[in-house]
Image (cartoon, grey):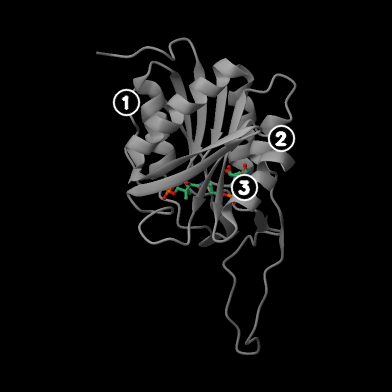
Amino acid sequence: NANQSLAGQHWVITAGPTREAIDPVRYISNHSSGKMGFSIADAAQSFGATVTLIAGPVNLATPSNCNRIDVQSAENMHEVALEQTISADVFIACAAVADYKVAKISEHKIKKTSTNDEMSIELVKNPDIVASVAALKNKPFTVGFAAETQDVEHYAKGKLARKNLDMIAANDVAKQGQGFNSDDNALKVFWHNGSIDLPLTGKRQLAEQLVVLINDRMQDD
Ligand code: PMT
């Protein structure tokens, strides 16, 4: 019963968090588990796509038939994503990429001192991975995610336009039982002249609905 509708297509998917080093033992990160992105990779390969999964540090088994490339920082992920999208038909940015990195990573473990009750770490902006892919001359069909805690539609549509994406999948990460690290999720998906609600369900099932939607939208473009 194998459905091979994506045979011959190369899909590149980012998943999980990034880790931005502070010093040799500390980092800045977030609560992304990688479940959403890994589910999308698994759904795409089940329809016959050749899948490259660019994964931040997560604790998940590699879905079958996926070429997994592990990365740590946003800069690593950016570099690998640009390499991999040269041959891609679809790029899906599901990773929760750190917007900022530490300006100067300390070579040695930063010491607590008796004189300093406060300390600060200077941060600088990371490259925007999905926006760089969408700016390529031969850009793949480029899908972003939007993790929002308020005004989901407004912010998601802003990111769709500003990053020049073909589609954006927004999730409300303030709601209990969905978003970061849960097994279920719900998405509001927007493109330039349409939208659809994909209601709360398991991430693997939701991933399949998103993959089918992307394939439909690609035929229409
Ligand atoms: O991993 P799980 O635990 O399963 O959780 C899934 C999820 C909540 C992480 C996922 O569904 C999700 O929303 N991923 C995107 C998280 C995010 O960073 O959203 P954002 O609104 O900050 O970023 C918008 C888009 O730009 C995203 O596609 C992001 O990958 C991309 N981005 C952001 C910053 C950056 N420097 N480079 C990027 O490419």
Q: Which mark is residue 64?
A: 1
Name the residue carrying label 3: 156
Q: State yes or no: discs 2 and 3 in contact (Cβ < 8 Å).
A: no
Viewer-nearest of discs 2 and 3: 3
Task: Name the residue: 50% across, 14% down.
Answer: 9
Q: Which mark is residue 24?
A: none
Can you give x and y, in whole percent of width and height, for residue 92 in the image?
A: 54, 33
The total number of labels drawn is 3
- Secondary structure state at the residue bearing disc 1: loop
Task: Name the residue: 42% across, 47% down.
Answer: 186
Q: Is mark 1 within 8 Å of ligand 1?
A: no
Q: Amino acid at mark 3?
A: Ala
User: Is 123 placed above or below 95 here?
Assistant: below
Which circle's residue, 2 or 3, is located before the other in the chain?
Answer: 3
Q: Amino acid at mark 2?
A: Asn
Q: Nearer the viewer, residue 203 or 37?
A: 203
User: Is 101 placed above or below 79 here?
Assistant: below
Which circle's residue, 1 or 2, is located before the other in the chain?
Answer: 1
- Secondary structure state at the residue bearing disc 3: helix
Question: What is the CA distance from the residue labelled 3 to the residue labelled 1?
Answer: 31 Å
Question: What is the CA distance from the residue labelled 1 to the residue labelled 2?
Answer: 31 Å
Which circle's residue, 3 or 1, is located before the other in the chain?
Answer: 1
